[in-house]
Image (tube, rainbow, N blue to C red):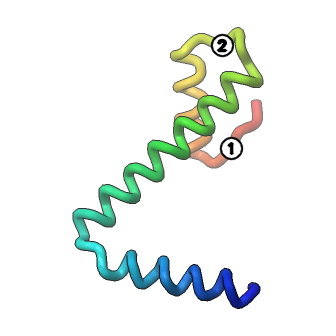
Amino acid sequence: MPDHLRKAEEIQNDLIRKMSPARRLETALSLYKTAWEIKKSGLRSMHPDWTEPALEARTRRIFVTGYAGD
């Protein structure tokens, strides 16, 4: 890993360590929600004919199982 990335990671880890447990949880949940929306958006663009419940179900399956195939 290049030195500048290593330094950035150290700074990020230091900031996370300084967060309260509540703030860490809030941040983790926000990142999870963002990842969910990105995945669902990608599925929507690949399958424009799918209904919202179908998109939700596939996104849930991917997040629960880690499997995106049919």
Q: Residue at x 66, y 13 (%)?
A: 50
Residue type pointed to by label 2: Trp
Mark 2 and mark 1: Cα distance apart in space: 18 Å
Residue type pointed to by label 1: Tyr
Q: Residues within 10 Å of mark 1 (few under 14, many from 20)?
A: few
Horizontal side of residue 48 vs 24, given as left or right: right
Query: Viewer-proximal residue, 32 or 59?
Result: 32
Above or below, 49 against 64 in this view is above
Task: Give the total of numbered labels.
Answer: 2
Estimate the x, y position of residue 3 in percent, counting from the top left.
70, 90
Q: Residues within 10 Å of mark 2 (few under 14, many from 20)?
A: few
Of badges 2 and 1, the one in the foreground is 2
Q: Residue at x 37, y 58 (%)?
A: 27
Query: Viewer-proximal residue, 9 or 63?
Result: 9
* Quadrant holding the N terminus: bottom right
Q: Residue at x 67, y 81 (%)?
A: 5
Per the rendering, the mark at residue 56 is none
Tell me the element at label 1: loop
- Earlier-in-chain disc, 2 versus 1: 2
Question: Which quadrant of the figure has residue 39?
Answer: top right
Query: Viewer-proximal residue, 11 or 52?
Result: 11
Say which residue label 1 marks: 67
Estimate the x, y position of residue 47 in percent, counting from the top left.
73, 19
2 and 1 marks in contact (CB < 8 Å): no
Above or below, 39 against 55 in this view is below
In the displayed orientation, state which residue is furthest to the front.
4
Say which residue label 2 marks: 50
* Quadrant holding the C terminus: top right
Query: Viewer-proximal residue, 66 or 34?
Result: 34
Q: Residue at x 62, y 29 (%)?
A: 41
Estimate the x, y position of residue 12 in percent, counting from the top left.
48, 77
